[in-house]
Amino acid sequence: MKKTFKMPSALTIVMIFLAIVAVLTWFVPTSVVTTNDAGENIIHFNAAFDADGNIIQNAGTNPVGLWDFFLAPIEGFISAADIAITILISGGFLAVLNSTGALDAGIGGLVKRFKGNTLITILMFVFALMGTVYGAWEELPAYAIVIIPLFVSAGYDVVTGMMVILIGATVGNMASVVNPYSIGAAVAAIGNDELSLGSGITLRLLLFVVMLAMGIFSVIKYANKVKKNPDLSCVAGLDTHTALAETESGNTELTGRRKASLAVFIIMILICIIGYIPWGSIPVGDGTAYDIVNGLQNAISGSFLGNFVGTDKFMPFGDWYFNEFSTVWLIGAIVVAVINRMGEKQFVSVFAEGARDLVGVVLVLAASRGISIFMGSSEEGMSITFIYWIQNILSSVPLWAFVVAGILVYLLIGIFLQSTSGVAGITMPIFGVLAFTLFASSSAGSLGGQTVLLSVFTCGINFVCGHYPESTNMGICEMSGVPYNVFIKQWAKILVPILVVAAVIISIAPYVGIV
């Protein structure tokens, strides 16, 4: 009997990719990035830093061996410890919330209140907004634990829930209307005083609306097809799984305690969103919204109440990262346990069990970080060499092909380095000059050319992130039991047309007065 090919698990795929990158280290030289007195980033090809930070020319390759290969996931785990603990704590919290019946009752209420299309539209808009405002991505597995079971309970498949989260966040990041970690970093790296976070915002808003509309339409089309005929699901016949796939949502009564538990959950999410929004980038009067949002903290800091609450160590809203996210979810788990009068032993047992269910996701995350270790950082490594080669190709591109070539270049760069701020810091000083020169005699002008470059960058680099086998994508695939080959095929069907339309909009923008 002929054996059929079965896609390896997410962890195995990441380890295979890690092995491929390890082989490349034997053939691709390292390069470094330095900053000159004018604040411009300069790439030094085939170079490395010594222990004192001096540049070593003709450094050659930095090959890794078998020991390095098996050590990489360990170092990756250490590097991603903040994300790992966030995933484990969120799993513990949701297990506690689920054990009270609140999550099941809440999902049942949502399914009854909103029809499928409305629910998909609302949630995709929320995740797209999170992506376009502050670049939401690595924290998405925490939301997947809730959203995916919601759609399974509503009669869809796990892929529908995954697409609502990941497609929504991807198009939001591709537009990056006011995302300081991509647009803000790119503007700063170009170094043109005439550019600001608001430069090209009309174009980015248009991209956001069009791309999100296309994404919602595609997801709804797939979701309705699957709900009508489950055999048409791209995971039909596969052993997918979610935390609540076996439950019957809607049969659990929404009691007072369960309503209070869900209220705690909603408040937690709102607090996390407030913590992540870059308030310092939002002008208000002579200052920014940063001081207003953090006014209470500043007012009580140093007082007895401030010392009791711990405001001296409280990270201001707008500067939050994974530690703050984890803290909120840990406090939330305890509050929900108190509301529902859970005993100490029951709470610890349920919380630990929920965290244990996501250990596989954390292992995938650790191996994914190992790939980044081999590739190098945004300052030194093999990744800088690839960027050096690619930027040389772009420098010879004619004006009419700039947008398409630029997006293709960022698609290539995204394979080797996924840090949007890192890629912006390395490429924008060079590409910014190129765009300035190419568009100088066009109707858009030099400033318009650099504005176009901003959207070329965000669309290209974030499109790759939407498909790349990194911690968020592979973690959610592992969590849902969806093979990576199924994931990338389905995502490409939706995101490739979106990228093509985005390229067309960006290409014509200089000629219709949008930039």
Image (tube, helix red, strand yellow):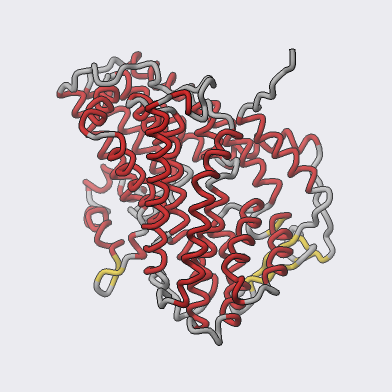
Q: Quadrant of residue 173?
A: bottom left
Q: Quadrant of residue 256?
A: top left
Q: Is residue 88 left or right of residue 103?
A: right
Q: Is residue 41 above or below residue 335?
A: below
Name the quadrant of the C terminus. bottom left
Q: Is residue 287 left or right of residue 91?
A: left
Residue drawn at x 47%, y 22% is 241
Name the quadrant of the N terminus. top right
Q: Nearer the viewer, residue 43 or 214?
A: 214
Q: Is residue 21 left or right of residue 194?
A: right
Q: Position of residue 34 (x, y in %)?
A: 67, 68
Q: Is residue 487 above or below residue 359?
A: below
- Asked if residue 442 shows in the view, the reply is yes
Residue drawn at x 82%, y 66% is 57
- Asked if residue 188 shows in the view, the reply is no
Residue drawn at x 39%, y 41% is 325
Q: Is residue 1 above or below residue 296?
A: above
Q: Position of residue 502 (x, y in %)?
A: 48, 60
Q: Nearer the viewer, residue 34 or 448?
A: 448
Q: Quadrant of residue 149?
A: top left
Considering every residue shown, the one lying at the far left of the view is 256
Q: Position of residue 4 (x, y in %)?
A: 69, 21
